[in-house]
Image (cartoon, helix red, strand yellow):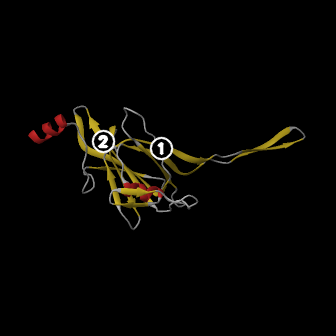
Amino acid sequence: MADIFLCDVALAEIKVKGGATHLFATADEVSGEPVIEEGENKPLKIKGQLLANKTTPDMILGHDFTIKDNRFSAELLADLQGGTASEGSYTAPAIGAVKNNKVFDFSAYIEVVGDDGATGEYLKYTYPNCTGGFISPNFKDGEYFAAEYTVKSRPAIGTAAYTVELVSELPVGAVLLMHPAVRQLQEEL
């Protein structure tokens, strides 16, 4: 794969195993960190003298993500943290309830750009075996709501932590948000 330049989260996708697929183009930030089991340094010392040193390697266990989304989706919230969604309402999980254990794959589509703008391609990062966490809603006068979803990816031992593939199409049903001037320009072409 040649050098690729990326800009903007075009789409986020959550595919619940045996359930719904959630596509949201309103995610403006996806931040993640690898979860690492750090290796140890095990020196052998006898009478104050270092005789040997064994270092164990670091191991990756998965990734933790925060996904910012500027919309409220009761159905997505129910799949990520539990609770129930119905027409026009959402009821959070009961106090003392066990966390939702729905398993899903999380994918982020990042726009590929060249020296003349968007190429029409995306790098699709897919993280398997994910579970959601509880959200922390924050509201502030004069600022738009932004849900921060927490996602933990913990693949099975021996499987890839994630995959990256170059794709030229987004999933069926995906509707991207774009500036009206850009949309008009694309329609004229």
Left or right of 84 on screen, residue 110? left
Query: Residue at coordinates 45% horizontally, 56% vertically from top-left?
Result: 80
Disc 1 versus disc 2: distance between alpha carbons? 18 Å
Please name the amino acid that badge 2 sits on.
Glu
Give the residue at mark 1.
32
**Crowdedness near tag 1: few (<14), some (14–19) or many (≥20) residues, C-alpha within 10 Å:** some
Task: List x then y, in percent, for residue 184.
Answer: 13, 38
Query: Residue at coordinates 48% horizontally, 46% vertically from top-left?
Result: 65
Task: List x then y, in percent, for residue 63.
Answer: 51, 49
Q: Nearer the viewer, mark 1 or mark 2?
A: 1
Residue, far bottom:
18
Left or right of 179 on screen, residue 16? right
Residue nearer the viewer, 4 or 27: 27
Residue nearer the viewer, 172 or 139: 139
Q: Is disc 1 placed on a helix, strand or loop?
A: strand
Residue, far left:
188
Residue nearer the viewer, 153 or 96: 96
Give the residue at mark 2.
111
